[in-house]
Amino acid sequence: MFHLRGLGSFFRRRFHKNVRANRDQILDELRICSSEHHIFDVVGKNKAKLTVNHVSSAVKMLWHFQKEKPQVLRTVELVNNHPQFLTLRVLAENKISLMDDFTLVDLLYSFLRLDVEPHDSLIQQLVSESWLRLDKLPMASLSKFAICLTDQHLQQSSLMGHITNIVDQRLSSINDARILTTLLISVSSLASPRLRDALISQAHILLDKMDQSHYNNARRVVQFLRNVKHSHRPLLEKCNQIVLHNVPRLNAENIGIFMGLYQSLQFNNCDFRLAAKQRLMELIDSSTDPFSFTKLFATLAPMASKEIQEGLESTAFLLADELSAQQALAIAETLEEIQSRNLSLITKIVSVIQRNLDVYRPMEVGRITQALYLLHYQNPELFSKLRNILVRFLEHSIFPYEVTMLTRVLSMLPLHRLEDSVISRVEAVVPQCNFNDLGNISLALSKWVRNDPSQRRGTPGKYVRLMQTLNRCGHEKLQTADRLDLLLEDFRYISGEWFEEILLEQSMATLQRMSDQINWSNVPDLALFLTRTNYLCVPVMERIAQVAVTDIDKIHHSATYATLLPFSVLNYDSEKADELYNVCIQRFTPHISSFDPHLLVLLAYSLALADSFPEAVIKEIFNIDFLGKLDAQLETLPDALNMRTRIRLMELNRAVCLECPEFQVPWFHETYCQQLQKKRNGLISPVQKQIHKLLDEVLGGYNFVQVAAVTPYFYTVDFECILDKQLQPLPGSESTSLEISDKGKISWGSTSLLKKDRNELSPGAQRIAINFLDSKSFCKNSHHVKGEALMKKRHLEILGYRVIQIPHFEWYSMELSTVDAWKEYLKKKIFTDRLT
């Protein structure tokens, strides 16, 4: 027995001796390294013994140490310049053929993260070897390799095309959300609509299965949707729920990224904005270094109160001298966004920008110039310097988006003499520009024509040639367009006189030519375009209604707002349009509690234009909880959207009070309307002055007509007068006003001039509202009155007015070219057309 014990002891000693002999001492030393310095020590002592495994481990650990540090504390440049890092690069390049697939791609990824240049022979060799093995790479390695190609700006290369094809073939086998979302970003520029939809479907499945704390997966999905310019609401909302779950863990940089992505997709989510604002407020005290503070300032300041903004500006002033060139630019743009008047801070930020002017890229110089111009910063010498830099960049730029942006910003600055080289460069890139770029160039061109001193002797030929080129390219793009989705994407931000005057008619003809491509997915975008143009194109409207009615279940409930908008705004009514309103109301009603507050208000107002007041919507909006949530959201929205929503809520409140008294909604905008009234300048246009003078003669004196009269519920009518039952004007209109009692009943106020109380007109008398309707009250291409003017007429009639509308095309017609003709026209309107 003792003999067996001794034999067992012998084998154990022999086994452990062999284990120690087989253990990799170098790898053990690398694994216990606690810093880059320790790694380089091990590499330096063992150069001749390093294997592929050693090199791979060392490089991956170097990147790991850097990744763990905050951005401001990383020392990638020091690592890159270390002699032993060169040793690792040489060894890696010499051992590429010995690497397995995982090691090959991991090393490429780590070296790129450690700022080895893409043109370096090591990177080139690693990419080439990975390409050779592409078809057999595991999906995890394929996704990482795709990231490496994206880092090298090879998103549209044939190699990325090969990867896109592999993803298409193996998509159903991808069951890791991180792998899929990484590939989404990489292949986004090459994915066909069919593959895009398949990727979205797979993302839906994997997001449901993954750990909800992995918010970066959701971020990459949203970034993919931004890249492919496809606002897929169900997937966006799923990503947003993941983000909301993680808001307490997000820093200002991450919140800023999500807000930027949401904005580009026109996704305004109330819950996210409120949670993000709260989180950013919590981060104020800990954001004390330039990097984190800049991210916080750029994200929080635009939606913070004035008090918080002032505190942020004070901190920015203290940190200004420590800001980098990019950070100073971010602060300047944010100051412009919030329209800051903190001259001392602006001046200090400008001094940082001036010190770094030579490091800014062309687009950044354009952004600097625009921000300072819009801040009304006064420094002619600086603007002159910026102008010279812009011109120099523009003369050498080959990118249409860059030339367009530089051209637009250059046109903001005072013009002394426009270089011919600028016009030549712009003309050279015009054929490659999209419609939005063409519109921006035309706007710049019109400014140059107005401001060029030589224009007094006639428009210079260089401007004429460029405008002709713009017009020709615009027409050619419309003639050759064959895909509606691409055209609508091109139309997304187009506006301005050039498009309306030169291309609008042809654009509508093109849309009619492509009407068979109108489907449920592009209906909302097409409807928004029609709304923006104010063009009533009946065939397209009918097609939109037909498609939406047929496929309403496929249209996201929130997209019903955009779908209905042109029908309400342009006052288009037909049997198919009526059916559209009905199916849209049925579609969104079950989801009204999930609408963003401001969007539900805008939707309800658009329905009110069309004289539609769904009870469920009205009850949802006019309750204390909803209005409280709306108030909280409005504080986070941009000023323009904030003001627009508040005005629409007031107009909706007025419409409900007047048209649906059975809902018993109180009028609670009295004070708000009084404040708006005080802000108005009270000026009347030349045509209103003309009509006022003529009304004086027609009615027999100024005391028979009131200008800019304010009604109950604060409508303003251009002119108000009163006729008795014999159609004779009654005096005292200027001093008579409408009042609303505490119970909401309308009564006419009495005046001392009348010397008696009068709550209503005498029998047979009538109160008349006369409104001049300019071109904004009609559709662009016809005399068809728009919904807003029609609703105002409807409401004034409810208030007891006889409403007379004077269309601009009648007033300015050849038939009314004399004073007598105008007076006769007014007489007929006032004294004869009693039933209009």
Image (cartoon, rainbow, N blue to C red):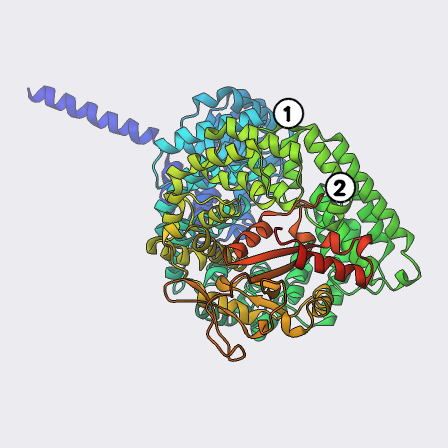
Looking at the picture, which amino acid does disc 1 mark? Asp
> Image height check: is 469 above or below 483?
below
Residue under the point 64% across and 74% down: 703
Between residue 573 and residue 508, name the one nearer to us.
Answer: 573
- As drawn, is 186 to the left or to the right of 815? left
Tell me, yes or no, if residue 45 can be seen here.
no
* Secondary structure of residue under mark 2: helix
Residue under the point 44% across and 70% down: 307
Between residue 694 and residue 650, name the one nearer to us.
Answer: 694
Assess whether mark 2 and mark 1 are in contact (beta carbons under 8 angstroms). Answer: no
> Image height check: is 476 above or below 389?
above
Query: Would you call the spot at circle 1 few (<14 residues within 10 Å), some (14-19), or many (20 or more)?
Result: few
Name the quadrant containing residue 742. bottom left
- As drawn, is 186 to the left or to the right of 242? right
Looking at the picture, which amino acid does disc 2 mark? Leu
Residue under the point 36% across and 48% down: 619
Residue located farthest toward the front when viewing the structure as drawn: 726
- Name the residue beneath numbered marker 2: 503
Q: What distance separates the C-alpha of mark 1 from that of mark 2?
A: 21 Å
Between residue 380 and residue 661, name the one nearer to us.
Answer: 661
Q: How far from the left and from the top, in percent, is residue 242? A: 38, 41
- Name the residue beneath numbered marker 1: 516
Quadrant occupied by the N terminus: top left
Name the quadrant containing residue 436. top right
Q: How far from the left and from the top, in percent, is residue 276? A: 41, 54
Residue under the point 75% across and 63% down: 413
Q: How far from the left and from the top, in percent, is residue 573? A: 58, 38
* Secondary structure of residue under mark 1: helix
Residue located farthest toward the right when viewing the structure as drawn: 457
